[in-house]
Amino acid sequence: MQIIRTLDELNENLKSVWENDNELLAYVPTMGALHSGHISLVKKAQEIAQKTIVSIFVNPLQFSPSEDFSNYPRTYEEDIVKLLATGADFLYYPDFDQAYIESIQKVKASEELSACLCGASRPGHFDGVCTIVNHFFELIKPDFAVFGEKDYQQLKILEDMLLRQQSIIELVPGKIFREESGLAMSSRNNYLSDEEKLLAANIYRLLSEEKKSFEDSSLESNSEMIDGTLMNIRKKLMQLGFDVDYVDFKWSRIFVAVKVGSTRLIDNIEINV
Ligand code: AMP
Protein backbone atom coordinates (compact mmCIF):
# COMPACT_ATOMS: atom_id res chain seq x y z
CA MET A 1 0.00 0.00 0.00
CA GLN A 2 1.35 3.39 -1.01
CA ILE A 3 0.98 5.98 1.73
CA ILE A 4 0.49 9.37 0.13
CA ARG A 5 0.96 12.63 2.04
CA THR A 6 1.25 15.40 -0.57
CA LEU A 7 -0.59 16.50 -3.70
CA ASP A 8 2.51 15.81 -5.82
CA GLU A 9 2.67 12.24 -4.50
CA LEU A 10 -1.04 11.83 -5.13
CA ASN A 11 -0.69 12.90 -8.77
CA GLU A 12 2.43 10.74 -9.27
CA ASN A 13 0.72 7.64 -7.84
CA LEU A 14 -2.65 8.03 -9.53
CA LYS A 15 -1.42 9.15 -12.96
CA SER A 16 -1.08 5.62 -14.32
CA VAL A 17 -4.48 4.59 -12.90
CA TRP A 18 -6.20 7.63 -14.45
CA GLU A 19 -4.55 6.94 -17.80
CA ASN A 20 -5.36 3.22 -17.86
CA ASP A 21 -8.92 2.67 -19.13
CA ASN A 22 -8.80 -0.88 -17.77
CA GLU A 23 -8.20 0.29 -14.21
CA LEU A 24 -11.20 1.70 -12.38
CA LEU A 25 -10.57 3.52 -9.11
CA ALA A 26 -12.84 3.19 -6.06
CA TYR A 27 -12.48 5.65 -3.21
CA VAL A 28 -13.41 5.29 0.48
CA PRO A 29 -13.31 8.60 2.40
CA THR A 30 -12.92 8.27 6.18
CA MET A 31 -11.98 10.25 9.25
CA GLY A 32 -9.84 7.37 10.53
CA ALA A 33 -10.14 5.45 13.82
CA LEU A 34 -10.97 2.63 11.44
CA HIS A 35 -13.27 -0.21 12.49
CA SER A 36 -14.81 -3.17 10.68
CA GLY A 37 -17.53 -0.91 9.20
CA HIS A 38 -14.87 1.12 7.36
CA ILE A 39 -13.08 -2.08 6.32
CA SER A 40 -16.34 -3.50 4.89
CA LEU A 41 -16.45 -0.42 2.62
CA VAL A 42 -12.85 -1.01 1.51
CA LYS A 43 -13.77 -4.62 0.65
CA LYS A 44 -16.76 -3.38 -1.34
CA ALA A 45 -14.44 -0.97 -3.18
CA GLN A 46 -12.15 -3.89 -4.02
CA GLU A 47 -15.10 -5.84 -5.46
CA ILE A 48 -16.09 -3.06 -7.87
CA ALA A 49 -12.75 -1.66 -9.02
CA GLN A 50 -9.22 -2.73 -9.84
CA LYS A 51 -7.66 -0.06 -7.60
CA THR A 52 -8.77 1.25 -4.23
CA ILE A 53 -7.85 4.40 -2.36
CA VAL A 54 -8.78 5.27 1.21
CA SER A 55 -8.39 8.72 2.72
CA ILE A 56 -8.03 9.59 6.37
CA PHE A 57 -8.77 13.19 7.22
CA VAL A 58 -10.57 14.52 10.29
CA ASN A 59 -12.53 17.28 8.59
CA PRO A 60 -12.68 20.39 10.80
CA LEU A 61 -15.38 21.93 8.56
CA GLN A 62 -17.99 19.39 9.63
CA PHE A 63 -17.62 19.99 13.38
CA SER A 64 -19.27 22.93 15.15
CA PRO A 65 -17.17 24.74 17.81
CA SER A 66 -19.00 22.83 20.58
CA GLU A 67 -18.33 19.41 19.02
CA ASP A 68 -15.52 16.91 19.47
CA PHE A 69 -13.03 17.85 16.69
CA SER A 70 -9.98 18.06 18.97
CA ASN A 71 -10.90 14.89 20.92
CA TYR A 72 -11.94 12.89 17.86
CA PRO A 73 -10.05 9.55 18.04
CA ARG A 74 -6.88 9.50 15.94
CA THR A 75 -5.40 5.99 15.69
CA TYR A 76 -3.16 6.30 12.65
CA GLU A 77 -0.78 3.39 13.45
CA GLU A 78 -3.62 0.91 14.02
CA ASP A 79 -5.45 2.22 10.94
CA ILE A 80 -2.44 1.44 8.73
CA VAL A 81 -2.22 -2.12 10.06
CA LYS A 82 -5.92 -2.68 9.24
CA LEU A 83 -5.60 -1.22 5.75
CA LEU A 84 -2.47 -3.28 5.02
CA ALA A 85 -4.34 -6.43 6.08
CA THR A 86 -7.24 -5.52 3.78
CA GLY A 87 -4.96 -4.85 0.83
CA ALA A 88 -5.99 -1.31 -0.12
CA ASP A 89 -3.73 0.07 -2.88
CA PHE A 90 -3.37 3.64 -1.65
CA LEU A 91 -3.87 5.56 1.56
CA TYR A 92 -4.15 9.34 1.19
CA TYR A 93 -3.38 10.94 4.53
CA PRO A 94 -2.96 14.65 3.82
CA ASP A 95 -1.72 17.22 6.26
CA PHE A 96 -3.71 20.27 5.14
CA ASP A 97 -2.97 23.42 7.11
CA GLN A 98 -5.60 25.92 8.19
CA ALA A 99 -4.92 28.32 5.29
CA TYR A 100 -5.29 25.50 2.75
CA ILE A 101 -8.56 24.33 4.32
CA GLU A 102 -9.94 27.86 4.24
CA SER A 103 -9.00 28.20 0.56
CA ILE A 104 -11.04 25.16 -0.49
CA GLN A 105 -14.01 26.06 -2.69
CA LYS A 106 -17.17 25.91 -0.57
CA VAL A 107 -19.98 23.61 -1.65
CA LYS A 108 -23.40 23.88 -0.03
CA ALA A 109 -25.53 20.86 0.75
CA SER A 110 -29.10 20.79 -0.60
CA GLU A 111 -31.17 22.90 1.81
CA GLU A 112 -34.13 20.58 1.39
CA LEU A 113 -32.18 17.40 2.23
CA SER A 114 -30.24 18.94 5.10
CA ALA A 115 -33.21 20.62 6.81
CA CYS A 116 -34.07 17.51 8.85
CA LEU A 117 -32.43 14.84 11.02
CA CYS A 118 -28.70 15.54 11.67
CA GLY A 119 -28.84 18.63 9.45
CA ALA A 120 -31.38 20.22 11.81
CA SER A 121 -29.36 19.35 14.93
CA ARG A 122 -25.96 20.18 13.44
CA PRO A 123 -26.28 23.41 11.39
CA GLY A 124 -23.59 23.71 8.72
CA HIS A 125 -22.44 20.11 9.20
CA PHE A 126 -23.43 18.91 5.72
CA ASP A 127 -21.99 22.03 4.04
CA GLY A 128 -18.67 21.07 5.65
CA VAL A 129 -19.06 17.47 4.45
CA CYS A 130 -19.92 18.53 0.87
CA THR A 131 -17.03 21.01 0.71
CA ILE A 132 -14.40 18.48 1.78
CA VAL A 133 -15.81 15.48 -0.10
CA ASN A 134 -16.09 17.56 -3.27
CA HIS A 135 -12.47 18.68 -2.86
CA PHE A 136 -11.21 15.12 -2.36
CA PHE A 137 -13.25 14.02 -5.41
CA GLU A 138 -11.52 16.73 -7.47
CA LEU A 139 -8.06 15.62 -6.29
CA ILE A 140 -8.63 11.85 -6.52
CA LYS A 141 -10.96 11.71 -9.54
CA PRO A 142 -12.36 8.27 -8.65
CA ASP A 143 -14.80 6.25 -10.75
CA PHE A 144 -16.66 5.07 -7.62
CA ALA A 145 -17.02 6.44 -4.10
CA VAL A 146 -18.20 4.09 -1.36
CA PHE A 147 -20.20 5.51 1.57
CA GLY A 148 -21.88 3.74 4.49
CA GLU A 149 -25.64 3.65 5.05
CA LYS A 150 -24.81 4.34 8.71
CA ASP A 151 -24.71 8.01 7.64
CA TYR A 152 -27.72 7.67 5.36
CA GLN A 153 -28.58 11.38 5.20
CA GLN A 154 -24.97 12.13 4.22
CA LEU A 155 -25.24 9.54 1.46
CA LYS A 156 -28.44 11.13 0.08
CA ILE A 157 -26.93 14.63 0.24
CA LEU A 158 -23.75 13.55 -1.57
CA GLU A 159 -25.82 11.67 -4.16
CA ASP A 160 -27.71 14.93 -4.76
CA MET A 161 -24.44 16.91 -4.96
CA LEU A 162 -23.07 14.57 -7.64
CA LEU A 163 -26.34 14.72 -9.56
CA ARG A 164 -26.37 18.54 -9.54
CA GLN A 165 -22.75 18.56 -10.72
CA GLN A 166 -23.56 16.00 -13.44
CA SER A 167 -20.56 14.14 -12.10
CA ILE A 168 -19.50 10.81 -13.55
CA ILE A 169 -18.54 9.52 -10.10
CA GLU A 170 -20.84 6.68 -9.05
CA LEU A 171 -21.79 6.60 -5.40
CA VAL A 172 -21.95 3.06 -4.00
CA PRO A 173 -23.70 2.42 -0.66
CA GLY A 174 -22.40 -0.05 1.94
CA LYS A 175 -24.59 -1.74 4.57
CA ILE A 176 -24.32 -0.82 8.26
CA PHE A 177 -21.76 -3.03 9.97
CA ARG A 178 -22.63 -3.86 13.58
CA GLU A 179 -21.04 -5.23 16.76
CA GLU A 180 -22.35 -8.63 17.85
CA SER A 181 -24.59 -6.74 20.28
CA GLY A 182 -26.21 -4.95 17.33
CA LEU A 183 -24.57 -1.61 18.13
CA ALA A 184 -23.70 0.13 14.85
CA MET A 185 -19.92 0.41 14.62
CA SER A 186 -18.68 3.97 14.93
CA SER A 187 -15.39 5.67 15.70
CA ARG A 188 -17.28 7.47 18.47
CA ASN A 189 -17.94 4.10 20.20
CA ASN A 190 -14.33 4.55 21.40
CA TYR A 191 -15.68 7.14 23.83
CA LEU A 192 -18.10 4.67 25.46
CA SER A 193 -17.45 2.75 28.69
CA ASP A 194 -18.39 -0.97 28.73
CA GLU A 195 -21.55 -0.07 30.59
CA GLU A 196 -22.47 2.63 28.07
CA LYS A 197 -21.85 0.15 25.22
CA LEU A 198 -24.33 -2.28 26.79
CA LEU A 199 -26.89 0.52 27.06
CA ALA A 200 -26.19 1.68 23.47
CA ALA A 201 -26.93 -1.83 22.15
CA ASN A 202 -30.59 -1.13 23.03
CA ILE A 203 -30.85 1.33 20.14
CA TYR A 204 -30.70 -1.38 17.48
CA ARG A 205 -32.67 -3.85 19.62
CA LEU A 206 -35.54 -1.35 19.86
CA LEU A 207 -35.33 -0.42 16.18
CA SER A 208 -35.44 -4.11 15.19
CA GLU A 209 -38.35 -4.90 17.55
CA GLU A 210 -40.42 -1.96 16.37
CA LYS A 211 -39.64 -2.73 12.72
CA LYS A 212 -40.86 -6.28 13.25
CA SER A 213 -44.08 -5.30 14.99
CA PHE A 214 -44.75 -2.65 12.32
CA GLU A 215 -44.20 -5.10 9.47
CA ASP A 216 -46.13 -7.94 11.20
CA SER A 217 -49.11 -5.72 11.82
CA SER A 218 -52.16 -6.79 9.81
CA LEU A 219 -53.41 -3.20 9.67
CA GLU A 220 -52.94 -1.17 6.51
CA SER A 221 -49.67 0.68 6.88
CA ASN A 222 -50.28 4.38 7.17
CA SER A 223 -48.72 7.50 8.54
CA GLU A 224 -50.52 7.14 11.89
CA MET A 225 -48.93 3.75 12.40
CA ILE A 226 -45.52 5.19 11.57
CA ASP A 227 -46.13 8.01 14.06
CA GLY A 228 -47.10 5.42 16.70
CA THR A 229 -43.93 3.43 16.03
CA LEU A 230 -41.76 6.56 16.30
CA MET A 231 -43.46 7.52 19.56
CA ASN A 232 -42.90 4.02 20.99
CA ILE A 233 -39.21 4.11 20.12
CA ARG A 234 -38.77 7.61 21.59
CA LYS A 235 -40.61 6.65 24.79
CA LYS A 236 -38.61 3.45 25.28
CA LEU A 237 -35.28 5.19 24.60
CA MET A 238 -36.13 7.86 27.14
CA GLN A 239 -37.18 5.23 29.70
CA LEU A 240 -33.77 3.59 29.26
CA GLY A 241 -32.14 6.93 30.06
CA PHE A 242 -31.07 8.11 26.60
CA ASP A 243 -31.03 11.81 25.82
CA VAL A 244 -33.02 11.62 22.55
CA ASP A 245 -32.18 14.11 19.80
CA TYR A 246 -34.59 12.72 17.20
CA VAL A 247 -36.57 9.66 16.16
CA ASP A 248 -37.86 10.23 12.65
CA PHE A 249 -39.02 8.52 9.46
CA LYS A 250 -37.72 9.32 5.97
CA TRP A 251 -36.64 7.45 2.82
CA SER A 252 -38.47 4.31 4.14
CA ARG A 253 -36.17 4.26 7.16
CA ILE A 254 -36.44 5.04 10.84
CA PHE A 255 -33.63 7.29 12.05
CA VAL A 256 -32.46 7.73 15.61
CA ALA A 257 -29.95 10.11 17.19
CA VAL A 258 -29.27 9.98 20.92
CA LYS A 259 -26.67 10.98 23.41
CA VAL A 260 -25.12 8.48 25.79
CA GLY A 261 -23.32 10.67 28.32
CA SER A 262 -21.69 13.23 26.04
CA THR A 263 -21.37 10.84 23.08
CA ARG A 264 -23.73 11.34 20.15
CA LEU A 265 -24.78 8.11 18.41
CA ILE A 266 -26.88 7.65 15.28
CA ASP A 267 -28.50 4.61 13.69
CA ASN A 268 -31.19 3.77 11.15
CA ILE A 269 -33.19 0.80 9.92
CA GLU A 270 -35.10 0.15 6.72
CA ILE A 271 -38.86 -0.45 7.07
CA ASN A 272 -41.08 -2.13 4.51
CA VAL A 273 -44.02 0.27 4.31
P1 AMP B 1 -16.34 8.34 9.19
O1 AMP B 1 -14.93 7.90 9.35
O2 AMP B 1 -17.17 8.22 10.42
O3 AMP B 1 -16.46 9.68 8.51
O4 AMP B 1 -16.99 7.31 8.17
C1 AMP B 1 -16.41 7.04 6.92
C2 AMP B 1 -17.35 6.18 6.13
O5 AMP B 1 -17.58 4.97 6.83
C3 AMP B 1 -18.72 6.84 5.91
O6 AMP B 1 -19.16 6.54 4.60
C4 AMP B 1 -19.58 6.15 6.94
O7 AMP B 1 -20.94 6.11 6.59
C5 AMP B 1 -18.98 4.76 6.93
N1 AMP B 1 -19.29 4.03 8.15
C6 AMP B 1 -19.16 4.45 9.43
N2 AMP B 1 -19.61 3.52 10.27
C7 AMP B 1 -20.06 2.49 9.53
C8 AMP B 1 -20.65 1.23 9.82
N3 AMP B 1 -20.90 0.83 11.08
N4 AMP B 1 -20.98 0.41 8.80
C9 AMP B 1 -20.74 0.79 7.51
N5 AMP B 1 -20.18 1.97 7.17
C10 AMP B 1 -19.84 2.80 8.16
Image: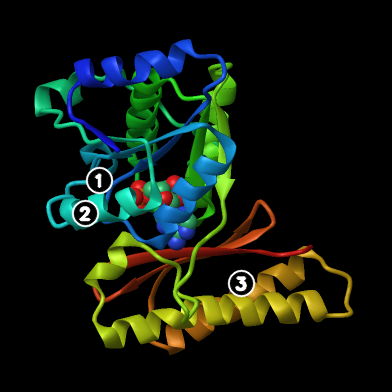
Amino acid bearing label 2 = Glu
Residue at 37 percent across and 23 percent down: it is 140
Quadrant location of the N terminus? top left
Which of 96 and 160 lies nearest the eye of the viewer?
Answer: 96
User: Residue 104 at x, y = what percent?
Assistant: 25, 20
The disc, 3 or 2, on the residue closer to the chain's N-terminal end is: 2
Amino acid bearing label 3 = Leu
Residue hosting label 2 = 67
User: Residue 226 at x, y = what percent?
Assistant: 71, 68
Quadrant location of the C terminus? bottom right
Residue at 29 percent across and 15 percent down: it is 11
As helix, strand or loop, the secondary structure at mark 1 comes to: loop
User: Residue 148 at x, y = what percent?
Assistant: 49, 50
Give how far apart the Cα atoms at labels 3 and 2 are: 27 Å
Q: Are marks 2 and 1 in contact (CB under 8 Å)?
A: yes
Residue 230 marker: 3
Mark 3 neighbour density, 10 Å: few (under 14) some (14–19) many (20 or more): many
Give residue 201's quadrant in the image.
Answer: bottom left
Q: Are marks 3 and 1 in contact (CB under 8 Å)?
A: no
Image check: 255 left or right of 238? right
Give how far apart the Cα atoms at labels 2 and 1 are: 6 Å
Which of 261 and 133 lies nearest the eye of the viewer?
Answer: 133
Residue at 58 percent across and 16 percent down: it is 166
